[in-house]
Image (cartoon, rainbow, N blue to C red):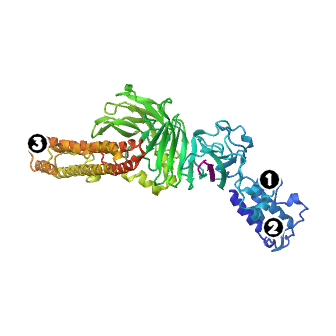
């Protein structure tokens, strides 16, 4: 029970008309009057002296509501001493802490400002800010009954600290920022963790931004809500020479922090070392940013609703989410010439809307692996092991394009339309991670292992996607995650009734078995259905290739018209146009091999003609037709896969190419949105499911 409910119960107790309370009536010779209050108290009292005070206080309201035992009267006034005792007990019941269900998030007053770096040296002097300020009065019961005491504001003597089992947030008044720590383990909510490591793992510093400069110090702090399971603070930051900036911070039971701006706040900065930043794709591949060799110290990112920060040490991450709007995200990096370049902060303009921040820490929460030449064509056990189940993934270069690979549960082979067959490059054996790289997926550069989504992830752990859904809501998150768009389109005409290996190779192979058995005439209906299935497969490929041709034509017109209206973007747009041109070029190169619908109809006629009569030449004739079927289908497989890879490359390069000039972001978002539409519901020959 929270203090707010205790207050309601207290009011009910103090306002109850005790003089009208009914009493028990015993009929007959056993009836007796109430004993004197000073007579036999130890024997007849309902309040055992041995009961702990807290237990007594909590039981008292229920007991008090029961009839007064020992009275022969139906009604009558309660003895005055009992009513006085009731009021006293009720007051104590209001202010005593509830040991049965303590608050899950606590607000503390440190008594003096935090040092830099902060420590817990004077933790014994900290005071918990009560959820009901009446408890600070000399007579809490009287204060609770007097409207004059209502509306009192708490005045901090030092800095504010908010802490729950997942985070610590230190409001440093002198530095004008909120220092955020993430906790890996459950910490008692009854108070701050003891010891020098009690804060948790430092994630970074939250700094509100005014239109002209970051804030310098905290001028004032108001407690808007302190309810035991939620703390809401209105914090006024000084930002000279600009006007003060007021920000509302909301903390709950988990690691999510809501940061809501007011009119004078333009954005927020998460300051601290960042190893890599990830802009999730969901449809398409994620964009991964590290320090660049660009002379620019600000990198403009085409993030739309979500950003994942991977922190040094491979044990901590944070995720930012924000609702749709005109927000812009920037990464700041150190200047060149001052040693190895590092990412120093991420800035987000807020467009007047909240941003949500959630941090996590655990050993091995992400991993960087250098792809060494020695990895070529062998199974390599990494030094990293997954800390818990999730949908872990990484990226490798396949045919020159960065490609996402989700970790499988075991090694195996995969066939792809462009590179052909090769060993799948990433899998787990238990918790142990393995790579197998090849000439088709070469060991060059580095790979990052991380996750966005859960997969048998332990309860209570929020994945980045969980945070997105919890902060924006499932309805707003649905178009971002686009689960429906990540499903493969089918090329099976009859579902499970047709040949399961739905492709020209699979169908012709199934038909060949019948010809080899000399059953082509008796199983003519089966062959006819299989050939129709094969035609359906070819038709679906042709339709998909046509979609890519229309996409290429439309986006080429967009790039050219945008370059005409914005000449400063021409170099950027022309590079992207050179990528788009590869789609019609691949089509033209393979057009002869892909043949036509009329060619497929002629192959159908010739194949079915062999089922009219048995002949020793049927098998040999069919094998020649088989080559034509497979040549046509193979060319189409290649083109549809190549179109998909080109569209993914355009999706990536539109994002990476916009980083050095924020003027490119509008065009980048439009290009990436168009790529996202064409990449929805790919065919199995384009990419594996839910990549």
Q: Secondary structure at mark 2?
A: loop
Near-viewer residue (83 or 653): 653
Q: Is residue 75 above or below residue 452?
A: below
Q: Secondary structure at mark 3?
A: helix
Mark-to-mark CA distance, 2 and 3: 105 Å
Q: Position of residue 618 (x, y in %)?
A: 10, 43
Q: Position of residue 231 (x, y in %)?
A: 63, 52
Q: Secondary structure at mark 1?
A: loop
Mark-to-mark CA distance, 1 and 3: 99 Å
Q: Is residue 358 left or right of residue 612?
A: right
Which numbered disc covers residue 621?
3
Q: Residues within 10 Å of mark 3 (few under 14, many from 20)?
A: few
- Residue labelled with disc 2: 68
Q: Tell me which label, 1 or 3, sits earlier in the chain.
A: 1
Residue 440 occupies quadrant = top left
Q: Residues within 10 Å of mark 1 (few under 14, many from 20)?
A: few
Which numbered disc covers residue 51?
1
Q: Which residues are magenta?
A: 232-242
**Rendered residue at 49%/46% (across/down):** 464
Q: Tell me which label, 2 or 1, sits earlier in the chain.
A: 1
């Amino acid at each position: 029970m929270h203090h707010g409910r205790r207050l309601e119960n207290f009011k009910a107790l103090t306002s109850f008309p005790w003089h009208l309370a009914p009493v028990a009536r015993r009929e007959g010779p056993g009836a007796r009057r109430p004993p004197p209050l000073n007579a036999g108290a130890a024997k007849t009292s309902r309040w055992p002296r041995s009961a702990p005070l807290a237990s007594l206080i909590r039981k008292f309201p229920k007991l008090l509501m029961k009839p007064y035992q020992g009275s022969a009267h139906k009604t009558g006034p309660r003895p005055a001493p009992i009513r006085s005792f009731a009021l006293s007990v009720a007051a104590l019941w209001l202010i005593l802490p509830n040991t049965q269900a303590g608050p899950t998030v606590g607000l503390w007053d440190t008594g003096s400002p935090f040092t830099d770096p902060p420590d817990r040296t004077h933790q014994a002097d900290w005071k918990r800010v009560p959820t009901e300020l009446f408890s600070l009065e000399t007579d809490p019961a009287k204060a609770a009954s007097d409207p004059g005491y209502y509306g009192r504001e708490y005045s901090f003597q030092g800095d504010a600290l908010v802490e729950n089992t997942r985070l610590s947030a230190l409001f440093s008044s002198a530095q004008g920022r909120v220092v955020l720590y993430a906790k890996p383990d459950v910490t008692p909510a009854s108070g701050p963790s003891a010891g020098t490591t009690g804060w948790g793992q430092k994630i970074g510093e939250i700094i509100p931004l005014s239109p002209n400069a970051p804030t310098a110090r905290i001028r004032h702090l108001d407690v808007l809500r302190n309810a035991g399971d939620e703390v809401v603070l209105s914090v006024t930051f000084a930002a000279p020479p600009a006007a003060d900036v007021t920000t509302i911070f909301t903390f709950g039971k988990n690691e999510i922090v809501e940061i809501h701006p007011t009119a004078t706040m333009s954005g927020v900065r998460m300051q601290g070392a960042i190893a890599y930043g990830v802009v999730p794709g969901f449809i398409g591949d994620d964009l991964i940013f590290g320090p660049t060799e660009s002379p620019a110290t600000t990198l403009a990112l085409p993030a739309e609703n979500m950003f994942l920060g991977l922190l040094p040490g491979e044990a901590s991450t944070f995720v930012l989410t924000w609702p749709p709007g005109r927000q812009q995200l920037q990464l700041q990096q150190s200047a060149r010439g001052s040693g190895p370049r590092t990412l120093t902060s991420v800035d987000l303009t807020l467009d007047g809307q909240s941003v949500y921040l959630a941090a996590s820490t655990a050993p091995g929460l992400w991993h960087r692996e250098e792809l060494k030449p020695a990895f070529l064509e062998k199974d390599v056990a990494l030094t990293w092991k997954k800390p818990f189940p999730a949908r872990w993934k990484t990226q490798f270069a396949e045919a020159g394009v960065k490609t996402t690979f989700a970790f499988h549960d075991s090694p195996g082979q995969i066939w792809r339309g462009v590179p052909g067959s090769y060993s799948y490059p990433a899998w787990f054996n238990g918790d142990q991670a393995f790579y197998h790289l090849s000439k088709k997926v070469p060991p060059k550069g580095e790979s990052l292992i991380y996750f966005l989504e859960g997969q048998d992830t332990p309860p209570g752990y929020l994945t980045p996607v969980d945070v997105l859904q919890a902060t924006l809501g499932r309805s707003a998150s649905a178009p971002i995650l686009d689960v429906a768009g990540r499903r493969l389109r089918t090329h099976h005409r009859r579902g499970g009734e047709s040949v399961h290996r739905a492709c020209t190779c699979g169908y012709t192979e199934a038909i060949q078995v019948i010809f080899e058995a000399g059953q082509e005439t008796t199983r003519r209906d089966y062959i006819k259905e299989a050939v129709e299935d094969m035609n359906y497969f070819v038709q679906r490929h042709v339709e998909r290739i046509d979609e890519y041709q229309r996409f290429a034509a439309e986006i080429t017109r967009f790039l050219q018209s945008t370059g005409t209206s914005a000449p400063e973007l021409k170099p950027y747009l022309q590079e992207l146009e050179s990528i788009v041109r590869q789609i019609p070029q691949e089509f033209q190169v393979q057009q002869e091999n892909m043949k036509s619908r009329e060619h497929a109809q002629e192959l159908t006629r010739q194949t079915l003609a062999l089922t009219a009569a048995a002949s020793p030449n049927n098998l040999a004739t069919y094998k020649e037709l088989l080559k034509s079927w497979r040549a046509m289908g193979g060319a189409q497989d290649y083109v549809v896969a190549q179109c998909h890879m080109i569209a993914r490359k355009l999706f990536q390069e539109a994002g990476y190419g916009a980083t050095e000039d924020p003027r490119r972001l509008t065009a980048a978002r439009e290009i990436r949105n168009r790529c996202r539409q064409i990449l929805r519901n790919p065919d199995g020959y384009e990419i594996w499911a839910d990549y």
